[in-house]
Image (cartoon, rainbow, N blue to C red):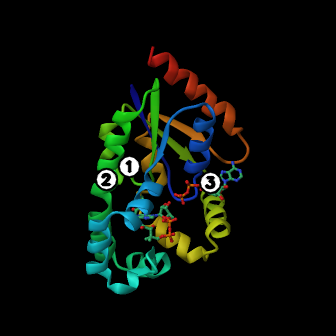
Amino acid sequence: MLKIGLTGGIGSGKTTVAKVFQVFQVPVLDADAVAKQLMEEDASLIQSITNQFGANAYVNGKLNRSFIANIVFKDAKALQQLNAIVHPATIAYAQKWITEQQAPYVVKEAALFFESGTDKEMDYMVGVTAPLELRISRVMHRDNISREAVLNRMSKQMPENEKMAKCHFVIQNNEEELLIPQVFQLHSHFLSLSK
Ligand SMILES: CC(C)(COP(=O)(O)OP(=O)(O)OC[C@H]1O[C@@H](n2cnc3c(N)ncnc32)[C@H](O)[C@@H]1O)[C@@H](O)C(=O)NCCC(=O)NCCS
Ligand SMILES: Nc1ncnc2c1ncn2[C@@H]1O[C@H](COP(=O)(O)OP(=O)(O)OP(=O)(O)O)[C@@H](O)[C@H]1O
């Protein structure tokens, strides 16, 4: 079974592209969603996060996202500590999930593939790209955060051009080129490779 990694910077449209693969009946794992789920359900992660960030890290069993974001996106060391707690568990979950799928190929979607080195576990990497200003305005609207907050998160990720240069395939999500035909072309290609 082929393993496809899907990545792109914040606001590029990874999750949107992942939904198109899902429409084509491809199993898709959203690593960001897995991380969110594990942070609220895995007892050892909850313990480590509480030890690291204090009791305010959770409110009524829910991760206090704005509290954590306020700390980690202002303090490189704290972000590194959070990543060290959350990423190994997320990577292990994804590895197990892949072995459980039965399909010609699977897609794992993650923002931080190259940053974590997990691209090496994939057969092919697909990048999603969009112009900077479009990415900024998408995230400002989606998450209701300021331009500065978006730029700050971006600065914690590998620059988009570097990321795309490392991908085998690149999808343009600039709202000019149509998305579905681009994803369909890749889908056909991966199906032909898996035969
Ligand atoms: C810090 C947290 C609580 C902030 O939550 P919030 O709801 O504000 O943001 P959300 O999770 O929706 O993330 C929005 C986007 O921010 C960027 N982002 C999130 N975490 C990180 C990170 N560790 N490093 C760089 N960028 C990140 C991604 O592009 C992501 O898609 C949350 O992002 C988190 O738990 N991050 C650690 C887990 C992680 O690394 N997830 C992303 C990759 S798997
Ligand atoms: N082609 C498009 N046309 C219109 N809106 C779009 C398009 N692509 C993405 N969007 C919107 O832009 C926002 C960001 O897209 P999406 O959540 O897919 O990005 P992402 O790369 O997964 O971002 P993040 O890393 O922050 O999770 C969403 O609100 C989405 O609906």
Kind of element beneath mark 1: helix
Of residue 81 and residue 89, the one placed in the foreground of this image is 89
Question: Number of labelled discs?
Answer: 3
Ligand 1 - quadrant of the structure image: bottom left
Spot occupied by residue 137 in the image (x, y as percentages of width and height):
66, 65
Name the residue carrying label 1.
Answer: 113
**The residue under label 2 is which amino acid type?**
Ser
Gap between marks 2 and 1 measured at Cα: 5 Å
Give the image location of residue 72, x and y in percent: 38, 76
Q: Position of residue 51 (x, y in %)?
A: 26, 80
Residue 141: x and y, percent? Answer: 68, 68
Between circles 2 and 3, the one closer to the viewer is 2
Left or right: residue 153 versus residue 96 is right
Please say if 40 is above or below 163.
Answer: below
- Considering the image in quadrants, where does the N terminus appear? top left
Tag 2 near tag 1, CB within 8 Å: yes
Which is in the foreground here, disc 3 or disc 1?
A: 1
Residue located farthest toward the top when viewing the structure as drawn: 195
Sooner in the amino-acid sequence: mark 3 or mark 1: 1
Label annotation for residue 131: 3
Check disc 2: other Cα within 10 Å, few if <14, some if 14-19, many if 20+. Answer: few
**Residue assigned mark 2:** 116
Residue flagged by tag 3: what amino acid is it? Answer: Pro
Q: Could you tell me if the residues under marks 3 and 1 are in contact, i.e. CB atoms within 8 Å?
A: no
In the rendering, which numbered label is found on residue 181? none
Distance from label 3 to label 1 (Cα)?
A: 20 Å
User: Which residue corresponds to the image point at 50% horizontal and 55% vertical from the top-left?
Assistant: 9
**Side of 58 relative to 89 (left or right):** right
The answer to whether 192 appears left or right of 113 in the picture is right
